[in-house]
Image (cartoon, helix red, strand yellow):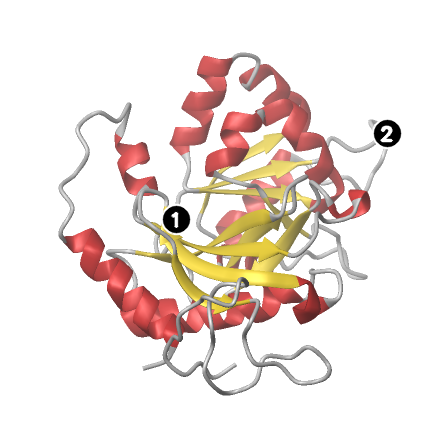
């Protein structure tokens, strides 16, 4: 069995033996414990331009099969005849049979999330948050750090076509099969790739492999900049699936073969990994 598949199986087995935590503030906190994260360790701190910029990582299988979605719109120029209004988007949602529960403008969002308590209520009200890509960098100051620790808004392209139409359904479906990766000022970063209880082992493994390819695309120097990859639940130990001693070719691409975890020469060998 490949190391990523072995890690997923081991994590799911460990999770099945755990008892639900009774000291959590609300049910959504318990649900957050069911997500599996791909943890990326870089060899160096990412450059400033890369830090705090969210990157969309497409996945073959959604982590939210029946999501409660909130869509955040840009305000747009007051006199513009081409700006998207809440009414227009709600009509599209109805006509295209899109599973978006709430549409809100950025200006309205500012008043909705004007305190820690109201931000927490807003956070817990929806599974997935989508936002017009033009305002994605404005949202951290509105939603706050606590919000971003649990749910990162996913950017969507909201532009009218030449005929005035908007393929909102396609944008929403693509976004719901994506997770967000943000590089901070350190070397350790993570992205959600699986969810216990709603996905099978094979689906999680497929997500892990696609996520690895997607994540590495944003790493400076690609594979040469990757120190290690792990899988973990938020409350579990991290399972190694790739280490700095992994076998790679001259271009830095991981090759089929044994993967040694640990950069100090004392790492143990994992099962063969096909990447």
Residue 158 location (% of width, % of height): 70, 50
Residue 137 location (% of width, % of height): 72, 37
Q: Which residue lies at the image location 31% right of the left edge and 72% below the top edge?
A: 6
Compared to 269, does 8 lie above or below?
above
Using residue 6 as the reference point, say whether residue 114 is left or right of it: right
Q: Which residue is mark 1?
A: 67
Q: Which residue lies at the image location 42% right of the left edge and 63% below the top edge?
A: 240
Task: Mark 1: give few (<14), some (14-19) or many (20+) Cα within 10 Å.
Answer: some
Image quarter of the N terminus: bottom left
Mark 1 or mark 2, which is nearer the start of the sequence? 1
Q: Nearer the viewer, residue 227 or 78?
A: 227
Front: mark 2 or 1: 1
Q: Which residue lies at the image location 26% right of the left edge and 27% below the top edge?
A: 24
3D distance between C-alphas at marks 2 and 1: 34 Å
Q: Which residue is mark 2?
A: 79
Task: Mark 2: give few (<14), some (14-19) or many (20+) Cα within 10 Å.
Answer: few
Using residue 180 as the reference point, say whether residue 241 is left or right of it: left
Residue 139 location (% of width, % of height): 66, 31
Q: Nearer the viewer, residue 198 or 225?
A: 225
| Residue 171 seen from this side | no
| Residue 117 seen from this side | yes
What secondary structure is marked by label 1? Answer: loop
Compared to 260, does 218 lie above or below?
above
């Amino acid at each position: 069995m490949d190391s990523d598949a072995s890690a997923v199986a081991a994590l799911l087995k460990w999770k099945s033996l755990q008892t639900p935590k009774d000291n959590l503030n609300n049910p959504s906190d318990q649900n957050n414990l069911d997500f599996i994260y791909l943890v990326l360790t870089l060899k160096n701190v990412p450059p400033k331009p890369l830090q705090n910029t969210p990157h969309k990582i497409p996945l073959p299988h959604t982590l939210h099969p029946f999501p409660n979605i909130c869509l955040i719109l840009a305000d747009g120029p007051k006199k513009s005849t081409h700006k998207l209004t809440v009414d227009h988007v709600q009509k599209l949602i109805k006509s295209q049979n899109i599973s978006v529960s709430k549409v809100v403008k950025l200006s309205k969002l500012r008043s909705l999330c004007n305190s820690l308590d109201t931000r927490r209520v807003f956070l817990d009200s929806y599974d997935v948050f989508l936002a017009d890509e033009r305002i994605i960098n404005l949202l951290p100051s509105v939603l706050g750090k606590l919000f971003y620790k649990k749910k990162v808004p996913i950017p969507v392209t909201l532009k009218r076509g030449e005929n005035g139409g908007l393929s909102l359904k396609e944008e929403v479906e693509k976004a719901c099969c994506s997770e967000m990766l943000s590089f901070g000022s350190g070397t350790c970063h993570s992205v959600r790739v699986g969810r216990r209880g709603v996905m099978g082992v094979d689906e999680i493994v497929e997500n892990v492999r696609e996520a690895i390819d997607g994540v590495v695309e944003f790493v400076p120097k690609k594979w040469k900049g990757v120190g290690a990859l792990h899988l973990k639940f938020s409350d579990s130990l991290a399972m190694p699936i790739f280490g700095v001693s992994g076998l790679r070719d001259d271009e830095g691409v991981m090759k089929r073969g044994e993967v040694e975890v640990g950069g100090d020469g004392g790492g143990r060998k994992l099962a063969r990994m096909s990447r």
